[in-house]
C-alpha cells in the first residue's frame, strides 16, 4: 500500500503543477488554447518516455486496445475541459469537489461496478466521509462568500456615507 500512496502522491504533485499552470496563465477567449498547449507538451513527454520503453509489440498493443485507447483519450479531453471550467471559474481550492466526486465515479463506478474490485465496510465509511467532505467544503465556501459580500457591502456603504458627509461639509 505504501507504493500506492507514493504513486498517488506523484500524480497529485503533477496535478498541482498542472493547476498552477492553468491558474497562473492569462485568460484567453479560446477556452481550449491552454489545454492544447499543455496536451502537446504532455504528448511530447509521453512520446519520449514511450521510446525509452520501446518493445517489439507496441504497435500490436495499440491495435488490439484501440477502443480503450480511444475511450481514454476522450476521458482525458472531458477531464481537462472540466478542469478548465472548474479552475477558471472557481479557483484551485475547489479541487476537493473534483477529487471526491472522482473517488465516487472512478473507485465505485469503474472499480467496483465495472471491474468488480473488492468493496467492504471500510471502503463504505471512506465513501461517506468523502461525501461529508464535499458537504462541509461547499458549506464553508457558502459562508466565506457570504462574509465576503457582507464585507464588500459594508465597504461600499462606508464609501457612500463618506461621500454624503463630504457633500455636507
Image (cartoon, rainbow, N blue to C red):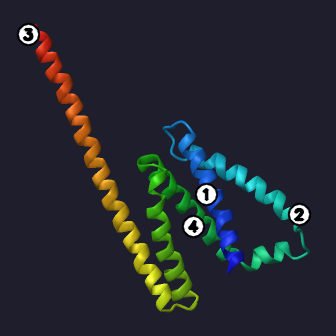
Q: Which of the two labelled residues, at mark 3 and mark 2, occupies the earlier sequence position?
A: 2
Residue at mark 3 to residue at mark 2: CA–CA distance: 78 Å
Q: Residues within 10 Å of mark 2 (few under 14, many from 20)?
A: few
Q: Which of the two labelled residues, at mark 4 and mark 3, occupies the earlier sequence position?
A: 4
Give the answer, above or below, for where 75 lies relative to 81.
below
Task: Name the residue at 79% across, 77% down.
Answer: 61
Tell me the SS state at disc 1. helix
Task: Determine whether, in the image, residue 49 is placed left or right of residue 143.
Answer: right
Residue at mark 4 to residue at mark 2: CA–CA distance: 25 Å
Q: Nearer the viewer, mark 3 or mark 2?
A: 3
Residue at mark 1 to residue at mark 4: CA–CA distance: 16 Å
Task: Determine whether, in the image, residue 125 is placed left or right of residue 24.
Answer: left
Q: Mark on residue 15?
A: 1
Rendering quarter of residue 124? bottom left
Name the residue that disc number 3 marks: 168
Q: Nearer the viewer, mark 1 or mark 4?
A: 1
Q: Are marks 3 and 1 in contact (CB under 8 Å)?
A: no
Q: Are marks 4 and 2 in contact (CB under 8 Å)?
A: no
Give the answer, above or below, for where 41 lies relative to 82.
above
Q: Are marks 4 and 3 in contact (CB under 8 Å)?
A: no
Q: Residues within 10 Å of mark 1 (few under 14, many from 20)?
A: few
Task: Determine whether, in the image, residue 54 is placed left or right of residue 61.
Answer: right
Q: Which of the two labelled residues, at mark 1 and mark 4, occupies the earlier sequence position?
A: 1
Q: Mark on residue 75?
A: 4
Name the residue that disc number 2 marks: 52
Task: Name the residue at 89% across, 68% down.
Answer: 54
Q: Residues within 10 Å of mark 3 (few under 14, many from 20)?
A: few
Residue at mark 2 to residue at mark 1: CA–CA distance: 23 Å
Q: Are marks 1 and 4 in contact (CB under 8 Å)?
A: no
Amino acid at each position: 500500500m505504501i507504493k500506492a500512496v507514493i504513486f498517488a502522491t506523484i500524480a497529485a504533485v503533477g496535478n498541482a503543477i498542472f493547476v498552477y499552470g492553468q491558474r497562473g496563465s492569462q485568460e484567453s477567449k479560446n477556452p481550449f488554447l491552454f489545454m492544447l498547449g499543455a496536451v502537446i507538451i504532455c504528448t511530447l513527454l509521453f512520446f519520449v518516455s514511450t521510446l525509452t520503453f520501446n518493445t517489439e509489440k507496441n504497435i500490436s498493443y495499440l491495435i488490439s486496445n484501440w477502443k480503450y485507447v480511444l475511450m481514454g483519450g476522450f476521458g482525458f479531453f472531458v477531464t481537462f475541459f472540466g478542469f478548465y471550467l472548474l479552475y477558471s471559474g472557481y479557483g484551485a481550492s475547489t479541487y476537493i469537489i473534483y477529487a471526491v466526486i472522482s473517488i465516487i465515479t472512478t473507485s465505485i463506478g469503474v472499480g467496483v461496478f465495472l471491474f468488480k474490485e473488492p468493496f467492504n465496510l471500510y471502503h463504505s465509511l471512506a465513501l461517506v466521509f468523502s461525501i461529508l467532505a464535499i458537504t462541509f467544503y461547499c458549506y464553508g465556501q457558502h459562508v466565506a462568500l457570504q462574509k465576503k459580500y457582507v464585507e464588500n457591502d459594508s465597504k461600499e456603504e462606508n464609501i457612500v456615507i463618506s461621500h454624503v458627509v463630504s457633500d455636507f461639509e
